[in-house]
């Protein structure tokens, strides 16, 4: 064989080996980059799933807070029901005052102070006055009438 053919074969073998190893290295780099991208996508997807769960929990907690606030408002409202103030008293006749949202007492105030015919209830926020009237002796039909 001639020298030129041997040199050409060696050059050809070197080119083949160089191309093969370069392609292998390039493929390994692409595979590595794909794995890294897959890891980032997995992290992103797990964050989205966790955020979805967090949003559901936030909705549940918001609902519980609304219920708790409603219960607190109810309890505060019950306290205000007994916010009726006795201004003046003469025997069973009483002059009372409170808010229009307060329940007007019937028969007695907090089970201690009895109310008689002609007693007055003045609503502080509306300015209306109501007169208490007992129709029957059993007090089953007692009412507050607007004056």
Image: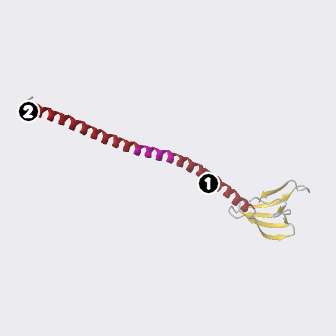
**136 or 110: nearer the viewer:** 110
Residue at the far right: name it.
137
Mark identifier at residue 147: none
Q: CA distance from mark 1 to mark 2?
A: 92 Å
Is 41 in the magenta? Answer: yes
Image position, residue 54 (x, y; %) = 53, 49
Label 1 crowd (10 A; few <14 / some 14-19 / many >=20)? few
**68 or 122: nearer the viewer:** 68
Q: In the rendered image, which residue does mark 1 sit on?
A: 65
Quadrant position of residue 88: bottom right
Q: Secondary structure at mark 2?
A: helix
Q: Residue at x 30, y 38 (%)?
A: 27
Image position, residue 84 (x, y; %) = 75, 65
Left or right of residue 134, residue 2 in this image: left
Left or right of residue 50, residue 134 in this image: right
Q: Residue at x 53, y 46 (%)?
A: 53
Image position, residue 94 (x, y; %) = 82, 67
Q: Dominant secondary structure of the magenta stretch?
A: helix
Q: Secondary structure at mark 1?
A: helix
Quarter the N terminus occupies: top left
Q: Nearer the viewer, mark 1 or mark 2?
A: 2
Quadrant position of residue 74: bottom right
Q: In the rendered image, which residue does mark 2 sit on?
A: 3
> Which region shows up in magenta?
39-50
Q: As displayed, is residue 31 above or below residue 105?
A: above
Quadrant position of residue 118: bottom right
Image position, residue 138 (x, y; %) = 91, 56
Label 2 crowd (10 A; few <14 / some 14-19 / many >=20)? few
Is 45 in the magenta? Answer: yes
């Amino acid at each position: 064989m001639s020298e030129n053919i041997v040199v050409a074969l060696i050059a050809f073998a070197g080119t083949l080996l160089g191309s093969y190893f370069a392609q292998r290295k390039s493929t390994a780099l692409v595979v590595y980059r794909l794995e890294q991208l897959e890891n980032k996508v997995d992290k992103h997807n797990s964050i989205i799933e966790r955020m979805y769960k967090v949003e559901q929990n936030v909705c549940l907690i918001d609902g519980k807070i609304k219920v708790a606030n409603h219960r607190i408002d109810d309890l505060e409202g019950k306290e205000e029901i007994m916010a009726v103030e006795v201004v003046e008293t003469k025997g069973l006749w009483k002059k009372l005052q409170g808010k229009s949202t307060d329940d007007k007492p019937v028969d007695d105030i907090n089970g201690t102070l009895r109310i008689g015919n002609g007693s007055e209830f003045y609503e502080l926020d509306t300015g209306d006055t109501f007169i208490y009237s007992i129709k029957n002796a059993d007090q089953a039909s007692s009412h507050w009438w607007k004056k």
